[in-house]
Image: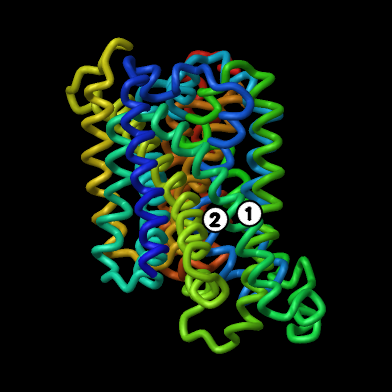
Amino acid sequence: MALDIFVVLLYAAAMLALGWYGMRRAKTREDYLVAGRNLGPGFYLGTMAATVLGGASTIGSVRLGYVHGISGFWLCAALGLGIIGISLLLAKPLLKLKIYTVTQVLERRYTPAARHASAAIMLVYALMIAATSTIAIGTVMEVLFGLPFWTAVLIGGGIVVLYSTIGGMWSLTLTDIVQFLVMTVGLVFILMPLSISDAGGWDALVAALPASAFDFTAIGWDTIVTYFLIYFFGIFIGQDIWQRVFTARNARVAQVAGSAAGLYCILYGLAMALIGMATRVLLPDLDNVNNAFASVVQLSLPDGLRGLVVAAALAALMSTASAGLLAASTTAAQDLWPLLGGREQGDGSAHVNRTFTLLLGVATLAIALVVSDVIGALTMAYNLLVGGMLIPLLGAIYWKRASTAGAIASMLLGSLAAAIFMFKDGLDANTPIYYGLAAGAVSFVAISLLSRRRQAPAASPA
């Protein structure tokens, strides 16, 4: 255990050192928010993949693999296909806009009121993304190192808040590259083969598990469709993902390296599902399936290697936590702070952005201390985002008759419907996203048509 702790501490020190180095490069607001819009293919691939693959993708997919078998990969598959889709379809027009936030597209198409309304939804989404991975960080450290959960959250999450605050996107990019490499080696090339080997090999898995564990649709078509509605489309409109797109040096980098990152996410999901299946053979009677990942790490790995895999898990979690945190602070500083009377900083300063990153980092830690279910928290974030934002954004790009009143009504009613059905039917239910999209679509079309006569036509930003 002492060797494992040393390895994890070494990793944490490296993250802080890279954060400090990133601070030296983040001299302007553009450096702080989008890494100077200058990332090449290697850095872009690593940071995009690391951003997407966090607590739900890692610990959650192992849990899904434990319960459902190989079909547990669909969560990561939906995310990966979303990355491929945004890379091929939206990256080029987005890079031409030279903006910082998703909500700025709505302002260009509608009015500032639409930007401010959508910013509130985006802020909640981004905070929940950050909190989800911070919860997972605490869970891993609690189980493996015997720390109280609150202590694990404050230590692990505090490191994320610190390096995100001081260096912004440059710190995130540099740490993401290391995190991408560590998680690939530790989880895909070490934990997956060793856990399968400990379970007796592939033939033993086939013999010990029911046939449904090897059925790619065993998780259920309703769940697969819901994953696509929530995560595939959520990738298309998430501030954390758009902000990574804005870092690309050019459209070619975003399209090619982004598509490669999406493919990596799909393969990563398969690896996590296989780890979950091996864990089910090794530990068939777990009291809490949410602990499947941490339990198999304890069981299958020797000292030293266990520390490396813990560092790999923390890498996956920290990259997504930092992405959500920076997305939240960017939305707050660029979209909401001016609405409250604050003055938006010029390109020569990132002072306001750093302040918001620190404040929202503290809020993220507080949320992580009171929420426990990582997949539930992630689902809530994406339900609110997709239910409230997908229809107005698609309308902004593709429908000339869309109006500001219709967009705002769609955001409010879509997110409200999603929230009501999450409360009524539970976070795991499929109904919230269906009712959210239906309420958003009906209100958007109806109110846009009714109010169109009083609104001048506007051109699409794309």
x%, y% of residue 354? Answer: 25, 29
Residue 433 is labelled as 2
Helix or strand or loop: what does disc 2 sit on? helix
User: In the image, which is nearer the foreground, mark 2 or mark 1?
Assistant: 1
The amino acid beneath tag 1 is Cys
Which part of the image, by quadrant, shows the C terminus?
A: top right
Q: Is residue 114 visible?
A: no
Using the image, determine if residue 453 lies above or below residue 359: above
Using the image, determine if residue 40 lies above or below residue 434: above
Helix or strand or loop: what does disc 1 sit on? helix
Residue 76 is labelled as 1
Choose top left, top right, bottom left or bottom right for residue 66. Answer: bottom right
The amino acid beneath tag 2 is Ile
Using the image, determine if residue 114 lies above or below residue 201: above
Q: Residue at x 49, y 74 (%)?
A: 298
Which part of the image, by quadrant, shows the N terminus?
A: bottom left
Tell me if mark 2 has few (under 14), some (14-19) or many (20+) residues whose alpha carbon lies within 10 angstroms of its own: many
x%, y% of residue 56? Answer: 51, 58
- Residue at the limit of the structure toward the left, as seen here: 341
Alpha-carbon distance for marks 2 and 1? 18 Å
Q: Is residue 354 left or right of residue 222?
A: left
Residue 432 is labelled as none
x%, y% of residue 196? Answer: 69, 72
**Viewer-nearest residue: 135 or 278:** 278
